[in-house]
Amino acid sequence: MQSLEELDLYFMKQALREAEKAFFEKEVPVGAVLVHQNKIIAKGHNQVELLKDATAHAEILTLTAGSAALGDWRLTDATLYCTLEPCLMCAGAMLSCRLKRLVWAAEDLRLGANGSWIDIFQERHPFHQISVTKHILKAESALLLKEFFQKRRKEKALLTSLKNDY
Ligand code: ZN
């Protein structure tokens, strides 16, 4: 029997794999997995660029796939592992589906709705509270994001210098 800490590490690694998929698809690298009875029932990664949809965050796609897998919009017995602190939209979706537990990795300093920008889970919700664990594999997730934005800046600079050559 594995401890909760070991399980959290294992499932967050799977979420990081999803984030890596996003990285290679030139999407901001955020990944998520949804776990029910110690099994992954849904995975997802950010697809905002591909779907040209600002709501296509890893968490939303994973919650939607998880509800489809369970045949129930209520996720009262599920844990979502995500490589990034949720934004306000995703935090709202987690409350709407009555998510049992959220585990996240790196802070989103600009948009994070669990302490960085605002802390929505600090507010008492009329009928649901989510149990939260933060900073599991925080450094790994933050590094992937940093690499992504550095690469993107370099590519932009290269494009600009190429344009200037003509
Ligand atoms: Zn979000």
Image: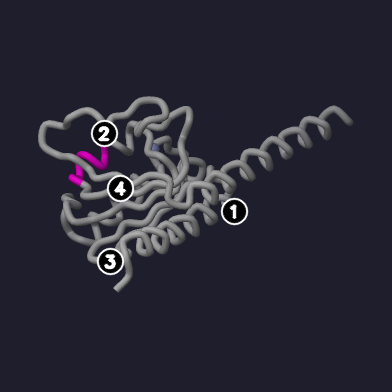
Secondary structure character of the magenta stretch overall: helix
Please give left or right for residue 93 compared with residue 72 in the image. right
In the depicted structure, whether residue 143 falls above or below residue 36: above
Q: Dot 1, crowdedness within 10 Å: few (<14), some or many (≥20)?
A: few
Please give left or right for residue 28 compared with residue 3 in the image. right
Question: Label 4 sits on what residue type?
Answer: Leu
Task: Examine the rendering and report whether any part of residue 153 can be seen.
Answer: yes
Question: Label 3 sits on what residue type?
Answer: Asn
Q: How many marks?
A: 4
The residue located at (35%, 34%) in the rendering is: 114
Q: Give the mark nearest the N terminus, 2 or 4.
A: 4
Between the residue at mark 2 and the residue at mark 3, the CA separation in whole angstroms equals: 24 Å
Q: Dot 2, crowdedness within 10 Å: few (<14), some or many (≥20)?
A: some
**Boundaries of the magenta span:** 92-98
Q: Dot 4, crowdedness within 10 Å: few (<14), some or many (≥20)?
A: many
Between marks 1 and 4 in the image, the one whose residue lies nearer the viewer:
4
Q: Residue furthest left?
A: 127
Task: Examine the rendering and report whether any part of residue 166 can be seen.
Answer: no
